[in-house]
Image (tube, grey):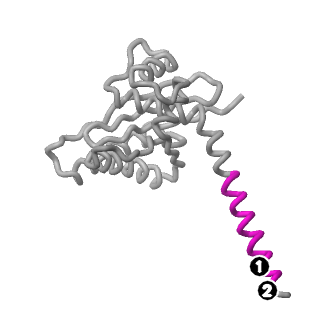
Amino acid sequence: MTHATRVLGVDPGLTRCGVAVIEGSAGQKVSLLHVGVFRTDPGDSIEQRLISIERDMESLVDELEPDVVAVERVFSQHNVRTAMATAQAAAVALLVAARRGLPVAMHTPTEVKAAVTGNGRADKAQVTAMVTRVLRLDTPPKPADAADAAAIAICHAWRGAATQRLERARREMESQRSSGTSTQQAAAARR
């Protein structure tokens, strides 16, 4: 039996930052521990808004003690201002995780949709419907940012361990290659 992992999923945003904490693993049922959004006032300065998200994120991490933080990877969007705000909110989640020594995973929207619905091109309604079903909820998480955060957490619980193993293997192979190259270079230099 696979050990359940507690995942904090983050759908970054400056006005509404979706967050969800789930517990589960690949091939196992997933349980919802928390879902919601951190809201900031668009009239406040950007630094005050980021501090507000940071405080809320720290409180949530301290209270629910996730094993890993999964954040939606920010894609370049047509609206640069929106992309920047999203990236700034994502950076807050990464910072909070790093301070606590928590591993971080980044998942693209397509990866999340594929993991949760089986279709990387699923629309928001399909993702929300599957999140509701997978978590055995009576009503869908609202707003959409909260449902998206739950989808990110589910994606990581189901795919994250395999993805992390592949990444670790890739790094080990690169390390061996560079170490092998260094050994070969040193041997050639001695000749």
Answer with left or right where residue 187 lies relative to residue 169. right
Q: Is residue 73 above or below residue 118?
A: below
User: Residue placed at 27% from the left, 50% from the top?
Assistant: 51
Residue type, numbered disc 2 = Ala
Secondary structure state at the residue bearing disc 2? helix
Q: Of 86 and 157, which appears nearest the observer?
A: 86
Magenta stretch: includes residue 177: yes
Q: Position of residue 98 (x, y in %)?
A: 47, 54
Which residue, given by chain and number where applicable, does mark 1 sit on? 185
From the image, which quarter does the N terminus lie in? top right
Within 10 Å of the Cα at label 2, are there few (<14), some (14-19), or many (20+) other Cα atoms?
A: few
Residue type, numbered disc 1 = Gln
- Magenta span main SS: helix
User: Residue placed at 68% from the left, 53% from the top?
Assistant: 170
Magenta stretch: includes residue 146: no
Label 2 with label 1: CB-CB less than 8 Å: yes
Magenta segment range?
A: 169-189
Mark on residue 189? 2
Q: Position of residue 77 (x, y in %)?
A: 34, 44
Q: Is residue 108 above or below residue 189?
A: above
From the image, which quarter does the C terminus lie in? bottom right
